[in-house]
Amino acid sequence: MQFNTENWLLERKKTKKKTLAVLVDPDKWTKELNFFLRNGDKSHLPDIFLVGGSLLSTNFLEKVVAQLKELGKPVILFPGNSLQITDKADAILFMSLISGRNPEFLIGQQIHAAHRVKESNLEAIPLGYILIESGAPTSVQYMSNTQPIPAAKNDIAMSTAMAGELLGMRAFYLEAGSGADSPVSDEMICGVRKSVEGLLFVGGGLRDAAVIKSKFKAGADIVVIGTAFENNPNLLKELSEELEY
């Protein structure tokens, strides 16, 4: 029977298991990070890997996905545009940037990618991508030419997620942005969690176990770290001991 990533994540959600994801940007993938993951304690690996980036100026996507697959964890594409697709992954977050008003990222890039995804073996998980203000402008804000939802406007985030759910989206991602000054607030996460049933990803500005634990407690099903791991690979060991994932 073929492995179904979404069902596996939903089962973890149902049993209240914490799911930690590491976001790997192929542009920032190094031999050192690869060596660390391959040769470190396998009990400290995250539950899943997300792969993608705002730019992806390299041709290493398939290579990075293949290397991560060897670690025995689900690998999910987190594409910044329609070019960031490979059927080497287990699944793809088929995202629409529902917090913005730029049609290119609401539906345009998705149209470009649709045939390739349908013709591949990729499992597509429809996801509402929601940018949240986090202090300084982020790469995704600049590249998407959209304004994030103000950090204090929990009601707008909740309504945005509800609209996505009514449109058929089964997962949501509250994104403060790579290296964000401030992560998405616990209050906003809690509000969105109460508003929708689907999987809830939270990422951006998460640098230590205490903050990450608070995001899980607030209602996140999957917490995503990226820049923090790039800067400190040993963070995975610290998190596995603190979170017991």
Image (cartoon, grey):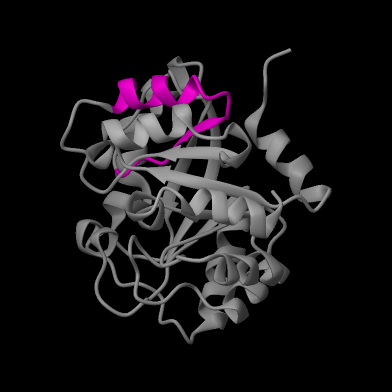
Taking the spot 57% from the left edge, 30% from the top edge, the residue there is: 74
Q: Is residue 4 left or right of residue 227?
A: right
Magenta stretch contains residue 77: yes
Residue 94: percent from left, percent from top: 46, 40
Residue located farthest toward the left when viewing the structure as drawn: 57
Residue in the foreground of this view, choosing between 52 and 160:
52
Kindly tell me whether residue 8 is visible in this rendering: yes
Residue in the foreground of this view, choosing between 185 and 195:
185
Residue 110: percent from left, percent from top: 37, 39
Compared with residue 234, is residue 101 higher up or lower down, i.e. above or below? Answer: below
Q: Which residues are magenta?
A: 61-80
Residue 58: percent from left, percent from top: 17, 32
Residue located farthest toward the right when viewing the structure as drawn: 15
Q: Is residue 154 left or right of residue 66?
A: right
Kindly tell me whether residue 83 is visible in this rendering: no
Q: Is residue 58 left or right of residue 94?
A: left
Residue located farthest toward the bottom when viewing the structure as drawn: 152
Residue in the foreground of this view, choosing between 139 and 153:
139
Q: Is residue 28 left or right of residue 160?
A: left
Give the quarter of the image for residue 201: bottom right
Q: How many marks?
A: 0
Compared with residue 152, is residue 124 higher up or lower down, i.e. above or below? Answer: above
Taking the spot 34% from the left edge, 49% from the top edge, the residue there is: 230
Residue 98: percent from left, percent from top: 43, 60
Residue in the foreground of this view, choosing between 98 and 191:
191
Compared with residue 186, is residue 96 higher up or lower down, i.e. above or below? Answer: above
Quadrant in the picture for the N terminus: top right
Taking the spot 46% from the left edge, 40% from the top edge, the residue there is: 50
